[in-house]
Image: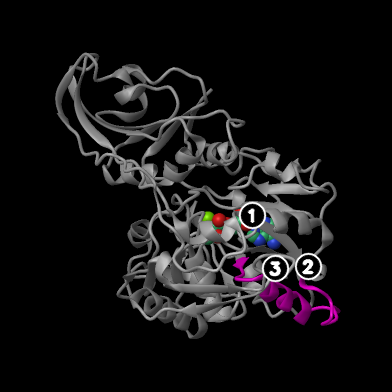
Amino acid sequence: MNSQINSYAPNGDATPTYDTKILPVDGARLGTLLLNKDSEFVLEDWEIELKDNQSVKNLQLAAEQLRGSKVPVAFPTETVYGLGADATRSEAVRGIYEAKQRPSDNPLIVHFASLRQLTDLLRSSSAHSSDEKPMDVIPAIYKPLIQKFWPGPLTIILPIAEKSPLAPEVTAGLSTFGARMPRNLLALLLIKLANVPIAAPSANASTKPSPTAAEHVKDDLNGRINYILDGGPCDVGVESTVVDGLSDPPAILRPGGISIEQLRTCPGWENVIVGYKDASEGSANGAAPRAPGMKYRHYSPAATVVLYESGLAAPGWKDVIKHGGDRVGFVRTTNWKENCGLADAGIAESKDETPKIKPVVLHSANGIVTTSNILNTLQSIVPKPTPKATHTTVHNPLTDQKTEVFDINLGGNTEDIARGLFSALRELDRKNVSAIFVEGIDDNEGDVAAAVMNRLRKAAEVMIQ
Ligand code: TXA
Ligand code: MG
């Protein structure tokens, strides 16, 4: 696996270099958005009257670093935490590969704060005249998607012209790049203040589950970066959907926060095809993957992930012995019972470590001038905290030994499962379990179900079908 780790790694040296700080930012206290209500797209261009508080200062500090430094900055988006750098400076982009120890042939997504910022970049590199409307600079096939899903968890593939200001390291030599506008005010404002497009992969160490909280980033990248902006847990929990509308028919290159059904409601996207495979690297008939990131082992905790396809019975003692041993984790979704029923007969002792899940708190968007519901949600949603593991010591009747069981219930709601999945895998890793048994869901069960199963199939070492 490590043979593919990049040549940018600082002499393969993992010694911490930086004092990594988590900077809290309250997305609801940043300022007042000023929008042009007449524009064709809600975030075509916008300004903000900034407040004067520590949240804003923290954002400014991070934006300054993005503009001038070669050390990337971690920040929340609605999907997962990203590791951002100025997409126009090679040195800064190389800093991402260094911090993540990521293969350099894996292209990065470029994040924009407004449609204007994206079209300025496209214009600066091609034969577009300045009197064209921003939307007309973008291939027409993407217009309905941008109208409907931006800002949000959707990445579109665009052509790069010869004189593009994008650093070549962003695209790993491809003639296209991925563009996205995150639905998170903190992320949008960071990009706006940095005043450059921001290249950002997920802020995990390469091969690990994507981070959905600031502490996850710290666990992976401590000492490798200076700042982690902390905007709380991510709302969606799986990465953006990547679509290629330049091919005919258009294709989904990575499933994510926007589903195939949602895409198919848009003109031109009725026949969008699935251009990705769920299987891990190497197992899929040898064809080159179209989204290069999909060929590497991904999303994997240190423990062995044993994935049960939807509808299968929960693991029994024999399965626990075969794959796990005396310290195992369960991630349950729709049907499996608490501790997979194993504790029913023989609890040795039980320690409940679960703070009860708090209900979602909604608060109003203070003093914000909004033109659409999307903007309200930019700062009015406080994401649900992710469920914690309970710990039970159970007597294994087959071996006559004690087994430590860590149990996480993500519940039956697909959005909740997506939001809590990576966090659950990481938490069970921290408990040092040797195997994590996961209850899969039906790929068609809801908008993000295909993305959830895609990530799980890539993380899994054992699949029970
Ligand atoms: O939700 C997300 O998309 C997160 C947050 C931080 O925005 N970002 C993210 O980036 O997941 P990353 O680098 O982990 O994944 C980028 C994906 C990979 O599968 C990559 O191969 C694909 O997008 N990609 C990027 N540029 C591409 C291109 N020009 N053609 C095809 N696939 C591309
Ligand atoms: Mg990633």
Looking at marks 2 and 1 on the same chain, the residue that comes earlier in the sequence is marked by 2
Residue found farthest to the bottom: 68
Real-space CA distance between mark 2 and mark 1, rounded to the nearest whole angstrom: 17 Å
State which quadrant residue 71 falls in. bottom left
Residue 247 position in % (x across, y down):
82, 53
Residue 174 position in % (x across, y down):
72, 65
Q: Residue at x 66, y 67 (%)?
A: 171
335 lies above or below 214:
above
Quick check: which quadrant has ligand 1? Answer: bottom right
Disc sitting over residue 154 in the figure = 1
Real-space CA distance between mark 2 and mark 3, rounded to the nearest whole angstrom: 26 Å
Where are the magenta residues, as a range?
110-134
Circle 3 packing at 10 Å, graded few (<14), some (14-19), many (20+), is: some
Q: Which residue is mark 3?
A: 173
- The answer to the question of whether label 2 and label 1 lie on touching residues, with beta carbons closer than 8 A, is no
Between label 1 and label 3, give the one nearer the viewer.
Answer: 1
Q: Camera-side residue: 358 or 224? A: 358
Residue type at tag 3: Gly
433 lies above or below 246:
above
Q: Is residue 397 left or right of residue 99?
A: left
Q: Is residue 132 magenta?
A: yes
Looking at marks 2 and 3 on the same chain, the residue that comes earlier in the sequence is marked by 2
Between label 2 and label 1, give the one nearer the viewer.
Answer: 2
229 lies above or below 423:
below
Q: Which residue is mark 2?
A: 135
Q: Secondary structure at mark 3?
A: loop
Examine the rendering and report whether any part of residue 86 can be seen: yes
